[in-house]
Image (cartoon, coloured by chain):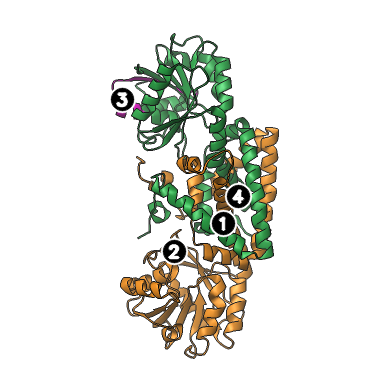
Chain colours: A orange, B green
Amino acid sequence: MSFNHIAIIGLGLLGGSIGLAVREHLPDCTTTGFDNDPDVRKRAAERQLADTICESATDAVKGADLVILCVPVGAMGDAARTIADTLKPGALVSDVGSSKSTISRTLMDALPGRSVIPAHPVAGTEHSGPDAGFATLFHQRWCIITPPEGADEKQLAALIHFWESLGAMVETMDAQHHDRVLAVTSHIPHLIAYTIVGTASDLENVTRSEVIKYSAGGFRDFTRIAASDPTMWRDVFLHNRDAVLEMLDSFLTDLALMREAIRAGDGETMFDLFSRTREVRRSIVALGQDDARPDFGRKDHG
Amino acid sequence: MSFNHIAIIGLGLLGGSIGLAVREHLPDCTTTGFDNDPDVRKRAAERQLADTICESATDAVKGADLVILCVPVGAMGDAARTIADTLKPGALVSDVGSSKSTISRTLMDALPGRSVIPAHPVAGTEHSGPDAGFATLFHQRWCIITPPEGADEKQLAALIHFWESLGAMVETMDAQHHDRVLAVTSHIPHLIAYTIVGTASDLENVTRSEVIKYSAGGFRDFTRIAASDPTMWRDVFLHNRDAVLEMLDSFLTDLALMREAIRAGDGETMFDLFSRTREVRRSIVALGQDDARPDFGRKDHG
């Protein structure tokens, strides 16, 4: 089986990119789209993020065999309840949320008797909204699918094939493990970046304009992450609380050790950590998950 | 006055870039270079990082009117003592170290009666060594000069002009203020990045290969910073201890507040911080200190 009609609910960075990627990679598929915000619908129609931009979520999902919820994590339950009675029998409901345990429960509670297989494409930029999407967002990026117990094998295979068609590499795992993996690879880095950018803006003896001026020494990379969508990230921390707190406490323990090494002038402990971490970087570049060029080819580099 | 003969001691990323930049921007200047490591000297000669690669630091500084020490912060004192007796009368000694209070004291103690004006070009990549340098590294980047009390005005003006000639924008401030500004814009971001990459490598319930695989969600940006030269960064934390601990404690206080907000499910506090930090990013992009393209134009983005 494969999907012929895909409904996209929420037309921001991810929803819009899915619409554009389907048109490019699955030209025989029909897409319908909806967003709660009329301005977003207008812009989505101009950019043709889906073949048809509908005026309601129920209109968008009518006849669809795959519905992908691309709304903030905190809005998933409402979005699912709105479409519950309109879904075509046998339709599969999926999503793109960054935390999976709570979303999985929320969707299954909101859609009793329906097929639900949550997914999370690990791809994004710091830009959001209907102008941010592009067709190649998922190329060579991982999409993690977290099938609930008893998920239909054929629908799972079709969902895997769908994401692979958009250029993604697919992995399946249980929702709880996903949440731990993402807490460390994504949620904690965002929390730290948001916090240090906040700290730097409020210092008494260094001005904000100095922080901005001299940001090329490392800080600017944190500001990119800390420019991500505030609503999305608030919802991530509200919904992946347990895994985030667990990983945050590991980080805080390690940071306290480094603080003590600095206080005590213990260069050996520092050198040991600073050497080990280079290896991780090499592996990421070797796996094609990042670019080895200095500063990723920012302008002004030779 | 301007400099006709520039000696570069240490031919890694910064020393090599200075040599290449002088050839491009100040073609009438002579450059001599030296590095303690014979392999680096060999590679520096092949890449012509300076007009003449010398076999000793004393050979390199003979007749130079500007000597720039481009060695790790912890090696500055030794480098200065080695050349002290060979310096031409009136020669200016400067450096490129990332912390300035202790270096300033170290250089003045090692070079009694000599002219010393420390400097710090805020530019770099995560690559190091004689292959890492390029002529445009300093273009549109800040160079902070920290003149000690009583520094010669003409030499200061010449040093400012030198860095501007290489494409840098120059600011002067006192060494202590420099150290606070850099602690927040560079040293703390590096410490945090090194620490989280270390934490992520050692988790019990998430494997290192999973961390590498799913790094595109934010983590990979930290790994780039955490791939910086270990010796250089150990020395930074050994030499800028006070400012680093001061800024680290501000960050830890703020992170504890965010931890509590997550624990308590306080979405408002999160949303407030996550919105404020976007502004800082916009200012950095507006000032030309970073690129607004998603992921700085990494491959696979449309």
Q: CA distance from mark 1 to mark 4?
A: 21 Å
Q: Quadrant for the N terminus of chain A, please.
A: bottom left
Q: Residue at x 48, y 89 (%)?
A: A86
Q: Are marks 4 and 3 on the same chain?
A: yes
Classify residue A295 by image quadrant.
Answer: top left
The chain holding disc 1 is B
Boundaries of the magenta span: B20-36
The chain holding disc 4 is B
Residue B273's disc is 1
Is disc 2 in contact with disc 1, using a CB cutoff of under 8 Å?
Answer: no
Q: Are marks 1 and 4 on the same chain?
A: yes
Q: Which residue is mark 2?
A: A128
Q: Which residue is mark 3?
A: B26
Closer to the camera: disc 4 or disc 3? 3
How crowded pointer 2 is (Cα within 10 Å; few <14, some 14-19, many 20+) is rated as some
Closer-to-camera residue (A171/B105): B105
**Which residue type carries mark 2?**
Ser
Closer to the camera: disc 2 or disc 4? 2
Closer-to-camera residue (B285/A266): B285
Dot 1 or dot 4, earlier in sequence: 4
